[in-house]
């Protein structure tokens, strides 16, 4: 019985193992096909035994992509297929991250496990860059724009010999690429930017020439494994010049490669940046002069090139012997190895876009009181790169960041809290362009959401975040932290949206009440101005229609809100005006219709005349104050009470406030206070202020408070006198 059960279990497991084996074989076949398509022509240049080793290694990397490790480094959600393409066959949108991948430093990792993962990533991507991607010029351009040359130079002294050799060889491939002639005059923005990246290596802080010399010096020291270098390894051996170096630290043929890089760079710098005259340090001249002894090389072409370089550059004295030499820098690590004048000057590099340059400008703007110039320069550099289609993703992200920083400052300093819609729309346009290039760009989404919040477009912010959160692929596009952020911000925006909708509903209700009041007043005015001999009967309250023909009159229509008293008072207004009309009818009997209407017509005429001058002066606060301060108060009162648009009240008050603060005489300040009081007491202004938004009310209140303080000072000075 037991045997039967065991046999049945084995029979059940055999199909499962068969399926697993078939799936594994299919995956291996898929990996082999992908690697052959991506790297087949490159692997053919290696001997068969090495081909097989490399193919097996790359298939293993295909089957086990470092997705989790790359997500941790790039701080974004990735799929296995994305990581495979990033390594073997990157798409154009993935080019921009190669600078990050090759610059990763395991020593800076937060933990040992992360350090090992980052080191593994760098080795994988450096190997693929050296084998294949260094010949992909569009990828190389994106890499160089993000400091790729300096990244390779930093690996010239890497502890791992393979990484060091691949970085050096990649540098040689880039400087000898058929797609770009480094010795041709740069034409176009992108070529000038590449030149600026190359000349930046001339600065002592770049460590480029020092890294070359350090690598060359390894070959001049005895091999620690050779019989000639047998010693006890004490300090005496080192002091006597017997310091040894393991042969494993030297690249085969490395001195010739280093000499070729040195020859390229010295010739290139001399042609473009030193007026065809380049001075070298004594250290470098001595190395070239004694190349055979210092490198132990016997390669004829290498020795010939070294002698040519020495003959060419020894025509000028060493840097240390020139009048321009700085004695304090001599014999130090910061001492220049070549004289480039201001070619490697930092200011020269900042004339072109780079991520480091713009980030430096934004840092300066965030810590400076006078930040406008830094913002303008940062935005200018980004715009130049975007127009030239160079580093577009970085340029748009940094320009959007600069615009957002400006909007934040404006929101804090503005009385109303509103921001410039033009800059806000430019920022949103950059975010949309970035999302068009990379739909899961979290930085662009965060900036877009914050701008919508500053503009108080809560409905747009909710719609944007809802579209992200309801996407079926949201978990594949974004990390858990990003999704949590989207949800939190969405809930906050929804609360603000509901509060705004409630406020708008309240304002609409108040507008309806105001319109009813104005209609009642208008009907009462018509009743007052109508000659008695024209009226057959005195209109009653029910004769006044405050709404549509089907709408009940204010006396019969029920009002359930808190402002019902205001609505019902309309009938009181009509009754008061009717009573006043009846009381004064006897006095008006002897006057004609024309004489009764003269005074309102004159008021409207004066108001229209004021408005014409007002519209010509409203764009300039000084001209507007000149108009307000010289016109007759009656003329201004007529305009305020009849035809002056309500949105002009804040403009007049701001002009009065500015003039009152700047006024030198008490007379001018008193005039400003008088005009402000006239505006403040006008019924139309009271309506406008009561129904305005909270921000407008704050702005009006701030202006009135400032004018009131001036009035109090005037009263105090009068009492003192």
Image (spheres, rainbow, N blue to C red):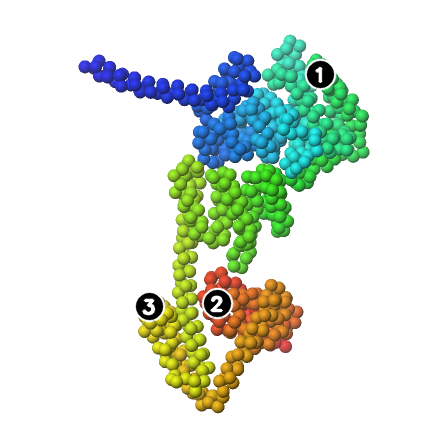
Tag 1, which secondary structure?
helix
* Residue 196 in sight: no
Tag 3, which secondary structure?
loop
Q: Is residue 25 above or below residue 372?
A: above
Q: Is residue 77 left or right of residue 401?
A: left
**Numbered disc total:** 3
Mark 1, residue position? 301
Q: Which numbered disc, 3 or 2, marks the residue that appears first in the sequence?
A: 3
**What residue do we see at 33% from left, 68% from top?**
560
Mark 2, residue position? 689
Q: Nearer the viewer, residue 361 or 369?
A: 361
**What residue do we see at 73% from left, 20% from top?**
306
Q: CA distance from mark 1 to mark 2?
A: 89 Å
Q: Which numbered disc, 1 or 2, marks the residue that appears first in the sequence?
A: 1
* Place of residue 650 in the rendered image (x, y in percent of width and height, measured from the top left): 54, 65
Do residues under tags 3 and 2 come within 8 Å of each other at their CB atoms?
A: no
Mark 3, residue position? 560
* Place of residue 691 in the rendered image (x, y in percent of width and height, measured from the top left): 45, 66
Q: CA distance from mark 3 to mark 1?
A: 102 Å
């Amino acid at each position: 019985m037991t045997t039967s059960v065991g046999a049945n279990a084995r029979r059940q497991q055999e199909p499962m193992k068969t399926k697993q084996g078939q799936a594994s074989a299919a995956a291996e076949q898929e990996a082999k096909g992908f690697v052959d398509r991506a790297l087949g022509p490159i692997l053919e240049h290696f001997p068969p035994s090495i081909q097989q080793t490399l193919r097996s290694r790359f298939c293993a990397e295909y089957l086990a992509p470092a997705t989790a490790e790359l997500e941790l480094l790039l701080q974004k959600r990735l799929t296995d297929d994305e990581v495979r393409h990033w390594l073997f066959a990157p798409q154009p949108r993935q080019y921009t991250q190669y600078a990050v991948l090759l610059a990763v430093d395991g020593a800076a990792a937060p933990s040992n496990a992360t350090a090992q993962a980052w080191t593994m990533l760098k080795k994988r991507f450096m190997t693929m860059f050296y084998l294949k991607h260094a010949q992909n010029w569009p990828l190389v351009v994106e890499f160089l724009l993000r400091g790729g040359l300096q990244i390779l130079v930093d690996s010239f002294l890497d502890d791992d010999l393979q990484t060091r050799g691949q970085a050096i060889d990649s540098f040689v491939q880039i400087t000898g690429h058929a797609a770009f002639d480094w010795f041709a005059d740069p034409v176009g923005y992108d070529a000038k930017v590449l030149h600026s990246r190359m000349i930046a290596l001339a600065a002592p802080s770049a460590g480029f020439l020092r890294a070359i010399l350090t690598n060359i010096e390894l070959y001049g020291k005895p091999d620690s494994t050779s019989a000639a270098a047998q010693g006890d390894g004490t300090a005496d051996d080192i002091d006597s010049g017997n310091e040894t170096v393991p042969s494993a630290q030297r690249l085969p043929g490395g001195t010739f490669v280093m000499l070729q890089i040195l020859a390229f760079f010295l010739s290139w710098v001399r042609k473009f940046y030193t007026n065809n005259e380049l001075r070298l340090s004594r250290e470098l001249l001595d190395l070239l002069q004694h190349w055979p002894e210092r490198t132990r090389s016997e390669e004829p072409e290498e020795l010939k090139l070294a002698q040519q370089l020495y003959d060419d550059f020894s025509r000028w004295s060493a840097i240390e012997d020139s009048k321009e030499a700085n004695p304090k820098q001599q014999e130090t690590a910061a001492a220049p190895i070549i004289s480039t004048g201001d070619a490697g000057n930092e200011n020269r590099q900042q004339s072109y876009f780079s991520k480091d340059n713009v980030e430096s400008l934004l840092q300066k703007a965030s810590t400076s009181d006078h930040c406008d110039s830094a913002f303008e320069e940062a935005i200018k550099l980004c715009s130049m790169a975007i127009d030239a289609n160079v580093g577009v993703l970085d340029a748009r992200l940094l320009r959007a960041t600069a615009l957002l920083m400006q909007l934040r400052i404006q929101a804090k300093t503005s009385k109303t809290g509103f921001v410039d819609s033009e800059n806000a729309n430019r920022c949103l346009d950059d975010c949309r362009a970035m999302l068009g290039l990379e739909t899961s760009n979290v930085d662009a989404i965060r900036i877009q959401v914050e701008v919508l919040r500053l503009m108080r477009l809560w409905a747009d912010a909710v719609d944007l975040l809802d579209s992200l959160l309801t996407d079926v692929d949201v978990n594949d596009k974004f990390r858990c932290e990003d999704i949590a952020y989207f949800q939190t911000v969405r809930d906050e925006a929804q609360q603000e949206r509901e509060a705004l909708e409630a406020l708008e509903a309240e304002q609409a209700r108040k507008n309806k009440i105001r319109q009813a009041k104005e209609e009642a007043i208008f009907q009462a005015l018509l009743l007052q101005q109508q000659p008695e001999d024209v009226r057959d009967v005195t209109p009653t309250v029910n004769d006044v229609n405050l709404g549509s023909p089907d709408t009940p009159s204010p006396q019969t229509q029920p009002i359930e809100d808190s402002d019902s008293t205001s609505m019902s008072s309309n009938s009181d207004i009509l009754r008061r005006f009717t009573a006043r009309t009846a009381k004064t009818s006897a006095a008006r009997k002897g006057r004609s219709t024309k004489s009764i209407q003269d005074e309102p017509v004159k008021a409207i005429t004066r108001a229209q005349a004021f408005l014409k001058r007002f519209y010509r002066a409203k764009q300039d606060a000084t001209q507007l104050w000149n108009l307000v301060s010289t016109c007759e108060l009656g003329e201004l009162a007529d305009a305020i009470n009849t035809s002056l648009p309500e949105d002009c009240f804040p403009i007049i008050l701001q002009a009065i406030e500015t003039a009152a603060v700047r006024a030198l005489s008490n007379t001018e300040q008193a005039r400003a206070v008088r005009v402000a009081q006239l505006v403040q007491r006008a019924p139309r202004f009271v309506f406008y202020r009561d129904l305005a938004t909270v921000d407008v009310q704050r702005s009006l209140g701030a202006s009135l408070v400032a004018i009131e303080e001036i009035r109090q000072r005037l009263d105090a000075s009068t009492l003192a006198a």
